[in-house]
Structures are given as C-alpha cells and as structure tokens.
Image: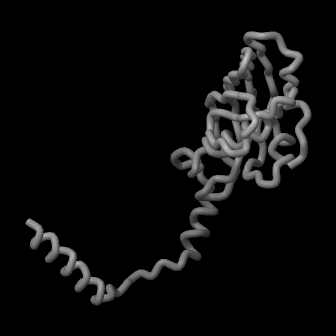
Amino acid sequence: MKKLDEFCIPFSNLKFGSNLFNFEINNSFFESFDYSIYEGCELILQLDFRKENNLMDLQFHYQGITFTSCDRCLDTVSVDIKSNFKSILKFGHDFEQIINDDVVYLPYESYEYNIAQQFYEHFLLNFPKKVIHDNDLCNSKQIALMNKYSNRPENVEFDHRWSKLKDFKTRNKNIKK
C-alpha cells in the first residue's frame, strides 16, 4: 500500500470540538492498495473529527457510486453506496495488546492519523457480497454462452447409498419422539 498523504490528519493542530473534512475518493485511492475489485468509483467521504481532551471521536459518512464486474455476466455494473461508521482514537502505552474494532489506540507521541486504511477496510467489509445487474439488464449473449458451455448433466442418476443414510436420519428422529 502506498502512503496516501491527503488522508493524513494532523490532529495536534486541530481545535477542540468538531472539525469537518471532505474527501473525494476515486480510482487512484483504490489503486494504491494491493487488492481492488473496483473498476472505478466516485465517492464523497465526510469526516467529523471531534477532538476532546483524552480522545478523538471520528464520524465517517460516505456515499457515491462504484463500478465493478457483474457476478453473473461479467459486464460492468454500477453500485450505489451509502454508509457511515464511527471510530474512537485513544492514547495509551499498551496499544498493541488491546483489540477493539471501534477503538484505535495510538502512542502518546502521535501527532497525526491516516484514515485511509481504516476507511478502505470498512468499505470492503460493507460492499455487497454479490453484485448483479437488475432484472433483464445482464448481457444476454454472455448468459447464453455460459449456459451453452456449462457442464450440467441432463439425467443425473442418484447414488442409492445416500438414501440409506436418509433412512437412518429419519429413523433416529422417530426414536427421540
């Protein structure tokens, strides 16, 4: 991963209270990471960075559109994205031993925080697992080609050894009753 300096927030210079940041996320953001399934994106990230005495509260809000491959026909499909999440930055000595998804522990000598990795991980985890076109928008030629070359046997003969196992399962249910 390349360092994304524009996502580095020097919190030591910020005023106490709410500080608002806006970021435009595009292809170059995702290309800087080793793994990207996105063919393009146009996202707006709004960050409310609340600085307090002992901690910092980060409220992430993002929305936009991403482009990726359809899982059915492999054509490009657009996916509308809208989400938000919260994170807390705290200072501590044993920050490596504490594991919490919502709380990030920083060493006391820290003066800036890069939000790029945290945003990227949240975005990946919240992206839909299955992405397909809406009804009848898939590439019909590609679907026909896949159906033509799929190896689905027409007449599958059932292996009768499995039916004996089903009988065993049914028999055990009747015994318990």
Q: Position of residue 95 (x, y in %)?
A: 72, 39
Q: Nearer the viewer, residue 138 or 13?
A: 13
Left or right of residue 7, residue 68 in this image = left
Left or right of residue 162, residue 12 in this image = right
Count of residue discs? 0
Q: Is residue 42 visible?
A: yes
Q: Position of residue 60 (x, y in %)?
A: 68, 26
Q: Is residue 78 visible?
A: no
Q: Nearer the viewer, residue 137 or 57?
A: 57
Residue at point 41% right, 81% down? Answer: 154
- Quadrant of the image occupied by residue 67: top right
- Quadrant of the image occupied by residue 143: bottom right
Q: Nearer the viewer, residue 170 or 59?
A: 59
Judge whether 19 appears above or below 136 on screen: above
- The type of colouring in the image is one colour
Q: Position of residue 150 (x, y in %)?
A: 55, 75
Left or right of residue 75, residue 32 in this image = right
Left or right of residue 46, residue 174 in this image = left
Judge whether 161 appears above or below 94 on screen: below
Residue at point 54% right, 70% down? Answer: 147
Judge whether 55 appears above or below 138 on screen: above
Residue at point 73% right, 22% down? Answer: 46
Q: Position of residue 137 (x, y in %)?
A: 58, 48
Residue at point 78% right, 14% down? Answer: 19
Q: Quadrant of the C terminus?
A: bottom left
Q: Nearer the viewer, residue 50 or 134?
A: 50
